[in-house]
């Protein structure tokens, strides 16, 4: 979510506090998991995703210490706001193949992807000049699946860019469906929409704000129903009734401490991959951005 639209969203209210629990990664936060898939097989692939709200600022807030602790096989970053020539020295991480995408406007949007295993192929964008000039989407092909990560356009204050957002939704759906004709798809990133009322603290006061309009929510529903058999929101599939599970909190009004937030970041998978999903996790106690990391654990054996 962009800064302007975040400020516009109605974030008054109260919730269970996170500040007392929040801790720096350097204190020894552990991410061990014995999660298993539907056949009882333990995960062997970890994919993490995080809107870092500026890579250089995130680096100064121990972002790469989190990466070392989490130790993902693949890490997707959104809103890096940084061209290749201005990457911090810390961005050179041993053991990972890095891929970077920036737009024509300096300090705006931008994506990153780290992978321990070199992808078969990496492509950038949706093939649309208007959308692609901002640097919002990376597609990486692996042996058994495609991984797509994106920073979805925000509809803006007063919904001035909602038509652009709706065009994005159409192009994205086409892209994912084309990929799925070849291999299953994992799609992650900051989608800039809270899909259901359970996905934000104050749904009733946000129906006309970016991120919770009828059009954006219906676009998400339409995406889930597309493709061969549809895509699955992994976190909500595993936690259908879990409230207070958010990935974004505005910096205003002490929203994060009150847990007045939005779930804007997701892992979707092709339905054929669902039996391989071991867990889908939100890490609300990890600081460094106005978003928090999300993690998908999979059994990739034989995919």
Image (spheres, rainbow, N blue to C red):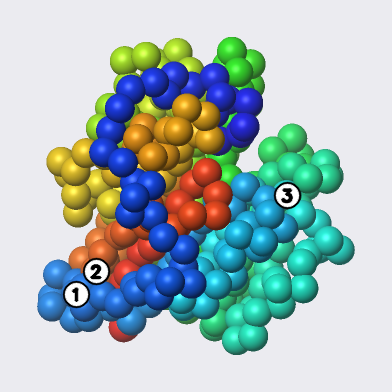
Whether residue 47 is situated above or below residue 226 in the rendered picture: below
Q: Secondary structure at mark 3?
A: loop
On residue 36, which mark appears?
1
Left or right relative to 150: residue 238: left
**Residue 121 x/y as whole percent:** 62, 72
Q: Which mark is residue 278?
A: 2
Residue that label 3 marks: 81
Q: Check disc 1 and report its element: helix, strand or loop.
A: loop
Q: Earlier in the sequence, mark 3 or mark 1?
A: 1
Badge 3: few (under 14), some or many (20 or more) residues near its Cα, within 10 Å?
Answer: many
Give the alpha-carbon distance from disc 2 to disc 3, as whole Å: 32 Å
| Image position, residue 264 (x, y; %) | 43, 40
What SS does tag 2 mark? Answer: strand
Q: Nearer the viewer, mark 2 or mark 3?
A: 3
Task: Name the spot of residue 7 as percent of width and height, x first.
Answer: 56, 24
The x and y percentages for residue 35 are 21, 73
| Vertical relation: 236 (above or below) 60 | above
**Quadrant of image for the C terminus:** bottom left
Indicate left or right for 27 with 134 as reference: left
Q: Are marks 2 and 3 in contact (CB under 8 Å)?
A: no
Is residue 181 positioned above or below 231 on the image? below
Quadrant containing the N terminus is top right
Is residue 192 shown left or right of residue 163? Answer: left
Residue 213 or residue 231, whichever sits in front: 213
Q: Contact (CB < 8 A) between labels 2 and 1?
A: yes
Find residue 99 and name its label: none
Residue 132: quadrant of the picture: top right
* Residue 20 vs residue 117, the one in the foreground: 20
Give the residue displayed 26% in from the left and 38% down from the top: 16
């Amino acid at each position: 979510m962009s800064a302007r639209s975040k400020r516009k969203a109605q974030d008054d209210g109260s919730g269970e506090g996170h500040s007392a629990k929040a801790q720096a990664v350097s204190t020894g936060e552990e991410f061990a998991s014995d999660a298993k898939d539907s056949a009882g097989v333990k995960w062997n692939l970890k994919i993490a995703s995080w809107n870092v709200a500026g890579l250089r600022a995130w680096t100064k807030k121990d972002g790469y210490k989190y990466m070392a602790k989490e130790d993902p096989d693949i890490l997707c970053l959104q809103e890096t706001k940084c061209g290749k020539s201005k990457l911090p020295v810390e961005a050179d991480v041993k053991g990972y193949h890095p891929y970077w995408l920036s737009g024509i406007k300096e300090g705006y949007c931008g994506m990153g992807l780290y992978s321990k295993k070199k992808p078969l192929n990496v492509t950038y964008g949706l093939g649309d000049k208007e959308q692609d000039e901002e640097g919002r989407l990376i597609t990486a092909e692996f042996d058994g699946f495609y991984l797509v990560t994106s920073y979805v356009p925000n509809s803006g204050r007063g919904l001035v860019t909602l038509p652009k957002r709706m065009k994005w939704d159409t192009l994205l759906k086409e892209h994912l469906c084309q990929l799925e004709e070849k291999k299953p798809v994992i799609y992650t990133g900051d989608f800039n929409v809270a899909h259901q009322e359970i996905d934000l603290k104050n749904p009733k006061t946000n129906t006309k704000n970016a991120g919770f309009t009828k059009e954006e929510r219906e676009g998400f529903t339409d995406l889930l129903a597309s493709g061969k058999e549809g895509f699955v929101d992994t976190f909500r599939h595993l936690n259908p009734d879990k409230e207070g599970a958010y990935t974004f909190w505005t910096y205003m009004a002490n929203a994060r401490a009150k847990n007045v937030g939005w779930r804007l970041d997701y892992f979707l998978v092709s339905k054929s991959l669902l039996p391989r999903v071991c867990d889908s996790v939100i890490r609300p106690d990890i600081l460094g951005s106005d978003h928090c990391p999300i993690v998908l654990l999979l059994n990739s054996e034989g995919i």
